[in-house]
Image: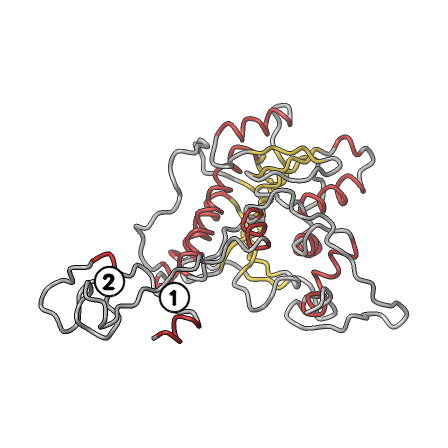
């Protein structure tokens, strides 16, 4: 496959490179803002789990670009991984489950609270859907925990969720802190994905609530909340952002989208600066990840020191009642037959 093959399969990946976004996820935040207007009146914003920085890019362009005085807009990006710098964005390499990280953000805001907190973080998926959904729920609630330290009353919180069978419990938790909770599915999010975004508006914590990082909001001790009915069950509205005129993220498009413009390949705007898979890629290129060759030992009837069998011996002969005496010769730790071994058998 050529380097343009992904441009054909993923139109938003292609558009992200053409428009200078670091990742296709930038369109998700743009489309959420088009639907809900979450950027209106925002001057202080926190981007949790920010790397590689596409959402921070959107915040910088839209908030600072449209402000009368860009210096009044304060944007803080937080992630455990290092991230390439962005204009107008203060980066904190820290853990969102630590109080010290929240204190550092508040200190940058000079004691004031944020108007908006966004989180596009997700775990490395395993393919085990129940496990992935649970870990994502834990990540979202960790983001909610630190948000209760940072967000002003009436503020907005946007975070990625996986819509699984137990997502009702998440909605119930979010409804405790926000008057309005909506699940949004941006057009740029693939229909085949269970990914969606919780848009939580009008932050209003319970009376007497004291923010803390001590107690998890979700553990394994719960029942099937889908069985609840009436006022005991929380039904959160689901909104598909965008209309049919937008590009379909599950469709393959031709390289030339516009008749008047020829297709030009664009490299990624910002490559990862220190990805966790960097060492593995280097080892693979040097062919150091391949398994070492192992010699295969063969026992023949002519060998008096071996057991009396014309088959390969693995420490105990099939036709013997006791272990083979020549243990060093007969035990094979690994069996890797090469062409030469097969010819000798």
Q: Residue furthest left?
A: 321
User: Taking 281 as reference, is 328 left or right?
Assistant: left
Locate residue 342, reporting x and y percent: 39, 74
Figure colour scheme: secondary structure
Q: Which mark is residue 101?
A: none
Q: Where 220 falls versus 45 (above or below)?
A: below
Could you give the CA–CA distance between mark 2 and mark 1, rounded to whole angstroms?
Answer: 15 Å
Q: Quadrant of residue 228?
A: bottom left
The residue pinned by badge 2 equals 330
Secondary structure beneath dot 1 equals: loop
Q: Quadrant of the N terminus?
A: bottom right
Mark 1 is surrounded, within 10 Å at the Cα level, by few (under 14), some (14 to 19) or many (20 or more) other residues, namely: few
Secondary structure beneath dot 2 equals: helix
Q: Residue furthest right?
A: 260
Mark 2 is surrounded, within 10 Å at the Cα level, by few (under 14), some (14 to 19) or many (20 or more) other residues, namely: many
Label 2 or label 1, whichever comes before in sequence order: 2
Locate residue 129, reporting x and y percent: 43, 62
Locate residue 296, reporting x and y percent: 35, 64
Q: Quadrant of residue 132?
A: bottom left
User: Taking 218 as reference, is 30 left or right?
Assistant: right
User: Taking 293 as reference, is 118 left or right?
Assistant: right
Residue at 48 percent across and 48 percent down: it is 174
Q: How many numbered tags mark residues here?
A: 2
User: Taking 301 as reference, is 145 left or right?
Assistant: right
Residue at 17 percent across and 65 percent down: it is 316
Q: Quadrant of the C terminus?
A: bottom left
Given residues 29 and 233, the one toward you in this image is: 29
The residue pinned by badge 1 equals 336
Locate residue 45, reporting x and y percent: 65, 38
Residue at 37 percent across and 37 percent down: it is 215
Given residues 28 and 282, the one toward you in this image is: 282
């Amino acid at each position: 496959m050529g380097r343009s093959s992904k441009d054909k399969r993923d139109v938003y990946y292609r558009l992200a490179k053409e428009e200078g976004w670091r990742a296709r996820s930038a369109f998700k935040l743009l489309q959420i803002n088009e639907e809900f207007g979450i950027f209106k009146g925002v001057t202080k914003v926190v981007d949790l789990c920010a790397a590689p920085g596409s959402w921070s890019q959107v915040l910088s362009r839209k908030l600072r670009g449209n402000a009368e005085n860009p210096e009044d807009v304060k944007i803080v990006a937080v992630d455990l991984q290092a991230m390439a710098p962005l204009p107008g964005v203060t980066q904190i390499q820290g853990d969102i489950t630590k109080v010290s990280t929240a204190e550092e953000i508040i200190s940058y805001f000079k004691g004031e609270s944020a108007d908006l907190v966004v989180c596009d973080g997700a775990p490395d998926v395993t393919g085990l859907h129940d496990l992935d959904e649970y870990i994502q729920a834990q990540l979202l609630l960790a983001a909610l925990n630190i948000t209760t330290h940072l967000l002003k009353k009436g503020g907005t919180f946007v975070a990625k969720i996986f819509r699984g069978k137990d997502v009702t419990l998440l909605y119930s938790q979010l409804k405790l802190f926000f008057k309005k909770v909506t699940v949004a599915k941006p057009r740029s999010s693939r229909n085949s994905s269970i990914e969606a975004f919780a848009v939580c508006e009008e932050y209003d914590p319970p009376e007497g609530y004291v923010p803390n990082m001590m107690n998890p909001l979700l553990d394994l001790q719960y029942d099937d909340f889908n069985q609840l009915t009436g006022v005991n069950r929380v039904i959160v509205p689901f909104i598909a952002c965008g209309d049919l005129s937008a590009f379909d993220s599950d469709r393959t498009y031709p390289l030339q989208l516009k008749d008047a413009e020829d297709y030009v390949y664009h490299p990624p705007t910002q490559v990862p600066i220190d990805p966790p898979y960097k060492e593995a890629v280097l080892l693979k290129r040097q062919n150091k990840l391949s398994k070492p060759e192992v010699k295969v030992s063969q026992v023949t009837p002519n060998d008096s020191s071996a057991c009396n069998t014309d088959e390969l011996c693995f420490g105990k002969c099939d036709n013997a009642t006791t272990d083979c005496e020549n243990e060093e010769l007969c035990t094979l730790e690994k069996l890797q037959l090469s062409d030469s071994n097969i010819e000798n058998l």
